[in-house]
Amino acid sequence: MQNKPFIPAVNQNSSQVSQDWRQIEQNWILAPKHPKAVVHFLGGAFFAAAPHITYRRLLEAIAAQGYVVVATPFLNSSFDHRQIATEIHQSFRRVRSKLFLDFFPVFGIGHSMGCKLQLLLNSYFAPERKGNIFIAHNNYSADRSIPLFKELSGTIAEMKGIEFSPSPYATEVLIDQSYRVANNLLIKFESDDIDQILPLTRQLQRKFANTIELRILPGNHLTCAGVELNWQTGGNFSPLDAIAQWMKQEIYRNNQTLEQAVLEWLELQLASKDLGKAD
């Protein structure tokens, strides 16, 4: 007799879904009652340690539409990005097997450094993916990614010549040679001047000319990491209160646009007959 998928039950109501995050095999899981696909999410450096909190708004919006969200946390404490990607891949495989998620199509989503890690694990291990979404991709070198790294490497001998592994160039070569997921959505924010979405878009378009979509949305590099602002105004409405309310409105509006773009693309991929086929 074939095993039926076991999915932890959660409430479909998006206002209550935040109470139903569960940690299983080091992954944070949010599952709707009647799932139709799986989203494997990786956050950016510093935000990725607690993705169920720092990316709560986006991830709960995805889960509310019928997707099992598996958010794998990691610490950006190593220059060996291949090892981090390996540990993430192994952790996701364990939870996917434990919850019988092999029965569902899987999409990957990455933000900032999480994009690079998605690219690495999809290139090294070629897991079955129906598509990937890259938000504000970052593949910069160590001296550009880490504050004061350049200054410290000039005075601390042990830091000289240290670079991420694989390096930015080696990562690009790896993508050219081994990345085989044809369906990709790339999202750039209008006020983000530190992402590398456009170069990644051009690289993937050379491999998969007809299945790459680029969306440019309002927001900045941290729009994806939208945490609800619970600002309580005082007895007298001050200019500071006005600024806080404006910020809350802007974050909400930008997140709504992001959520809509992500969910529209996911639904189109699920409806496609040629889902996930590479060139």
Image (cartoon, rainbow, N blue to C red):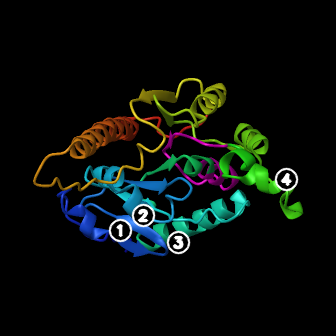
Q: Position of residue 271 (x, y in %)?
A: 35, 37
- Of mark 4 and mark 3, the one earlier in the sequence is 3
Residue bearing mark 2: 101
Residue bearing mark 4: 154
- In whole angstroms, how far apart are the C-alphas of marks 4 and 3? 42 Å
Check disc 1: other Cα within 10 Å, few if <14, some if 14-19, many if 20+.
some
Q: Is residue 110 above or below residue 279?
A: below
- What amino acid does circle 4 point to? Gly
Q: Are marks 2 and 1 in contact (CB under 8 Å)?
A: yes
Check disc 4: other Cα within 10 Å, few if <14, some if 14-19, many if 20+.
few
Residue bearing mark 1: 5
- Of mark 2 and mark 1, the one earlier in the sequence is 1
Which quarter of the figure is the N terminus placed in?
bottom left
Count of residue discs: 4
Give the image quarter of residue 52.
bottom left
Q: In the rendered structure, which segment of residues is drawn in magenta?
A: 117-139
- Of mark 3 and mark 1, the one earlier in the sequence is 1
- Of mark 3 and mark 2, the one earlier in the sequence is 3
- What amino acid does circle 3 point to? Arg
Q: Nearer the viewer, residue 45 or 198?
A: 45
